[in-house]
Image: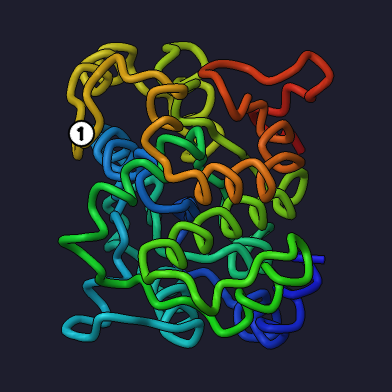
Amino acid sequence: MIGGVYAAVFRGVPDQISNIALWGSHRRFVVARMGSTGSTWLAHLLNSHPDVAATHEQILARVFPKRSYNSDDLVQLIRLMATDTMHGAYLAAGDVGSVWAPHLLALRGKFTTALLVRHPARSLNTRLRTYPSDQSFTEIPTWVPGVVRELWDIDTEKMSPLDRIFVLDLATFAAQSCLLGRVDAVLRIEDLQELEYCRDALWRLTGLRYPAMLIVRASHQRVNTRTPRGTTIREILSGFTPSQRHWYYTMLRDAAPLFEYDLDEDGAAAPRAPRFALHRT
């Protein structure tokens, strides 16, 4: 259903970017993600290699001083990335955090495409902590309330602004399941802390081998830390309101196991969930 909504809302995206021509010989990559998934850290790690140029949420700099952007803005950014030769100075270049799922699907075969995910409870907890002081780029798409009502029988009309954003994040996480098997890589930020997994992921994304020391150094450089180290998923859930916990379980019951997340615990989900890690083509 959500995949169908994406197709309807963004029906023109494939025609706009799927046939773009790439200038220069370096590899392009794009990584989509929700907020608070570790994308700043990943961009920092990618940039630690001298032959890689990775921007983080480049779209925000492109649209400044506006506090929102749309699909047309993203198409313009993608066209810029496709035609920028980087003066031949890099072997791989890309962006972490700008594109949306429909653009990711349309770019496969031209760019290396990846999705970055994090345990949803941790991403939601960060949203609850930061929203009171930062509501930038939190506009709710017009199609979201209807989809949430139809799929999960949840009415967002009378919710507080914070609860509406909370439910939007839940819907976004669930919607990401339509990307499984349709992008080049699906990366869990938790797995990127494992050296060999991380090296393999970076190679599949950039085509380059990262020295182990770069990854080890980055793993000790935490950025944007908003949750105390050692906080468990159950402790985070206890901080949700009863309504938020209800929405969390209702909307993610089916989606979370597809990403090997247990809604109540850190670590892997039930054994029946497939170990996708990287989608190999």
- Asked if one can make out residue 255 in the rendered structure from this viewpoint, the answer is yes
Asked if residue 151 lies left or right of residue 224, the reply is right
The amino acid on which the numbered mark 1 sits, given as a three-letter code, is Thr
Residue 155 lies, in percent from the top left, at 63, 71
Locate the C terminus and report the quarter of the image it occupies. Answer: top right
Q: Name the residue at 45% across, 32% down.
A: 237
Residue marked by disc 1? 225
Decide which of 188, 183 is in the foreground and name it: 188
Decide which of 159, 6 is in the foreground and name it: 159
Decide which of 104, 229 is in the foreground and name it: 229
Q: Name the residue at 36% across, 35% down.
A: 239
**Residue, far front:** 242
Asked if residue 230 lies left or right of residue 207, the reply is left
Is 195 rendered above or below residue 165? above
Is 107 rendered above or below residue 13? above
Residue 137 lies, in percent from the top left, at 32, 72
Q: Name the residue at 60% across, 59% down.
A: 171
Provide the secondary structure element on which disc 1 rests. Answer: loop
Q: Name the residue at 54% across, 19% down.
A: 265
Decide which of 248, 189 is in the foreground and name it: 248
